[in-house]
Amino acid sequence: MTVLGAFAVPHPPIIVPGVGGGEEKLASATVDAFHKVGKTVAKLAPELIIIITPHGESDFSE
């Protein structure tokens, strides 16, 4: 399996709507960058995506 890309997406907590309380607009450039990364990943169409996060367990499966 070939690695197609790697992305680091550090972010302030305010970009999470439940946390930001309307302050998300202050980090709009960060949110825009997240969308750009998402589009890039979609174009790469990877077979597998590995997500590493310090934010605890999550289930990203569909």
Image (cartoon, helix red, strand yellow):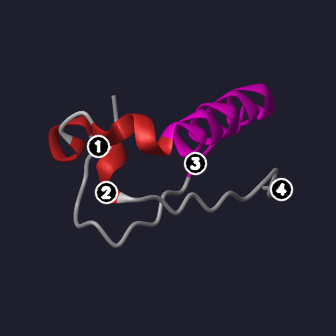
First along the sequence among labels 4 and 1: 4
Can you identify the residue that label 3 sits on?
Answer: 49
Which element is circle 1 on?
loop
Can you identify the residue that label 2 sits on?
Answer: 13
> Who's the residue at 28% across and 66% down the image?
55
First along the sequence among labels 2 and 3: 2
Pick the residue in front: 17 or 41.
17
Magenta part of the chain: 28-49
First along the sequence among labels 3 and 1: 1
Q: State how far apart marks 3 and 4 are (Cα).
A: 12 Å
Q: Residue 2, which numbered label? A: 4
Magenta stretch: helix, strand or loop mostly? helix
Quadrant that contains the N terminus = bottom right
Q: State how far apart marks 4 and 1 are (Cα).
A: 32 Å
First along the sequence among labels 3 and 4: 4
> Who's the residue at 36% across and 44% down the image?
15
Disc 3 marks a residue whose amino acid type is: Ile
On the question of residue 45 being in view, the answer is yes
Nearest to the eye among marks 3 and 1: give it. 1
Disc 1 marks a residue whose amino acid type is: Val
Disc 4 marks a residue whose amino acid type is: Thr
Across and down, in percent, residue 32 comes to 60, 33
Which element is circle 2 on?
helix
Determine the image quadrant of residue 48: top right
